[in-house]
């Protein structure tokens, strides 16, 4: 079987060269604890082994190269160069209590064409490899940042990339990143095969479903994927996920002025989420302020504050758990839906 990541390739090289088992631990210790970024500099290894690692994997431990960083008060957005001359972006958020959260990309561009999202205007260039996904986090780790929580909400639809599951295995492997499953969040526009696989293989990882309209025809206009995986089917899969895992499912809802922010919409969202069964209290709506970009095909505007308050009140009256998300990073185009790999 072909190795799915550099970590498997390193194991293969050590096996080919009949190296003792502790060598693997030495290399992981050099990468994750000593934060050594080039194989040549892992001097605890014999020279021939360092040369073989660099020859097979390239001189740098990371496969993504930072080329530009934009920083505002609580947010840092890094543009990475990846193989094939492409670019992807990742975002680091620092909360007031010092907690650091990362928003990483799984695809270069995105092929789903949601009408409000800048990334979708690029189209899909390609899926990222498991290394390219996890190396975005390795970059931050090697630069001294704690990896408190990670969300797959950067460029691309995470569940459309089959390498995602290899990346999750790497991130949760106690000998590598060692991230707790509950510190990872996958966001999806509703890809049923991926939701089913996540339920089976990583039941403790948080799941967020991008809803954005409770009405099928309007959601299809906003998010063409709805024609392939209609709302009703996705919600049935989410019910299965909650019953199987006992975990909350988050419903993301971007508020677009005069489009999906009416009281009628709020009541319809509540109607979708109520009466589903004894587990329905585990649905939690996250309302997201819209971030405008210059490249989206249609110009939407953020809802005004009174509209947002009425929406929240309507959901609460109808027994739906709801939070209005505070948005960081819109000043550097690092907020939801704004990642566009600017040169």
Image (cartoon, rainbow, N blue to C red):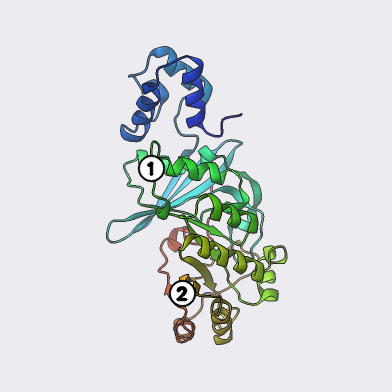
According to the image, label 1 marks what residue?
178
- Return the x and y of residue 160 as percentages of the image width and height: 62, 51
Q: What secondary structure is found at the residue carrying circle 1?
A: loop
User: Residue at (40%, 25%) from the top-left corner?
Assistant: 24
Say if 70 sits above or below 279 in the image. Answer: above
Say if 149 sits above or below 6 in the image. Answer: below
According to the image, label 2 marks what residue?
281
Whichever of labels 1 and 2 marks the residue nearer the N terminus, that label is: 1
- Return the x and y of residue 110 as percentages of the image width and height: 62, 53
In front: 203, or 144? 203
How many residues crowd around disc 1 within 10 Å: few (fewer than 14), some, or many (20 or more)? few
Instruction: Give the quarter of the figure containing the N terminus.
Output: top right
In front: 309, or 164? 164
Say if 336 sits above or below 145 in the image. Answer: below
How many residues crowd around disc 2 within 10 Å: few (fewer than 14), some, or many (20 or more)? some
Q: Is residue 55 visible?
A: yes
Q: Is residue 158 left or right of residue 48?
A: right
User: Residue at (49%, 42%) from the top-left corner?
Assistant: 169
Q: Calculate the distance from the C-alpha at mark 1 to the C-alpha at mark 2.
A: 30 Å
Q: Is residue 12 left or right of residue 127?
A: left
């Amino acid at each position: 079987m072909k190795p799915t990541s550099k970590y498997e390739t390193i194991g293969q090289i050590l096996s080919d060269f009949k190296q003792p088992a502790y060598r693997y631990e030495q290399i992981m210790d050099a990468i994750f604890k000593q934060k050594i970024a080039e194989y040549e500099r892992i001097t605890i290894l014999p020279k021939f082994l360092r040369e073989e690692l660099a020859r097979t994997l390239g001189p740098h431990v990371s496969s993504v190269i930072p080329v530009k960083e934009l920083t505002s008060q609580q947010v840092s957005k890094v543009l990475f160069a990846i193989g094939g001359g492409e670019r992807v972006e990742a975002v680091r958020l620092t909360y007031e209590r010092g907690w650091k959260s990362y928003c990483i990309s799984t695809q270069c561009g995105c092929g789903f064409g949601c009408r409000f999202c800048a990334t979708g205007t690029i189209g899909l260039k390609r899926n990222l490899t498991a290394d390219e996904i996890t190396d975005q986090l390795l970059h931050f780790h090697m630069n001294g940042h704690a990896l408190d929580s990670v969300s797959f909400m950067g460029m691309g639809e995470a569940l459309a990339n089959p390498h995602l599951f290899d990346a999750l295995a790497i991130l949760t492997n106690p000998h590598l990143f060692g991230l707790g499953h509950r510190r990872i969040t996958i966001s999806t526009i509703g890809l049923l095969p991926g939701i089913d696989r996540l339920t089976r293989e990583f039941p403790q990882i948080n799941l967020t479903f991008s809803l954005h309209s409770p009405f099928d025809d309007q959601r299809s206009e906003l998010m063409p994927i709805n024609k392939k995986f209609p709302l009703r089917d996705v919600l049935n899969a989410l019910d299965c996920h909650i019953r199987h895992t006992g975990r909350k499912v988050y419903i993301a809802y971007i508020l677009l002025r005069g489009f999906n922010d009416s009281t009628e919409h709020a009541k319809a969202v509540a109607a979708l989420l109520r009466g589903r069964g004894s587990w329905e209290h585990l649905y939690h709506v996250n309302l997201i302020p819209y971030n405008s970009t210059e490249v989206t095909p249609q110009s939407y505007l953020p809802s005004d504050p009174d509209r947002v308050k009425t929406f929240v009140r309507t959901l609460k009256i109808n027994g739906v758990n709801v939070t209005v998300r505070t948005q960081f990073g819109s000043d550097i185009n690092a907020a939801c839906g704004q990642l566009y790999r600017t040169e």
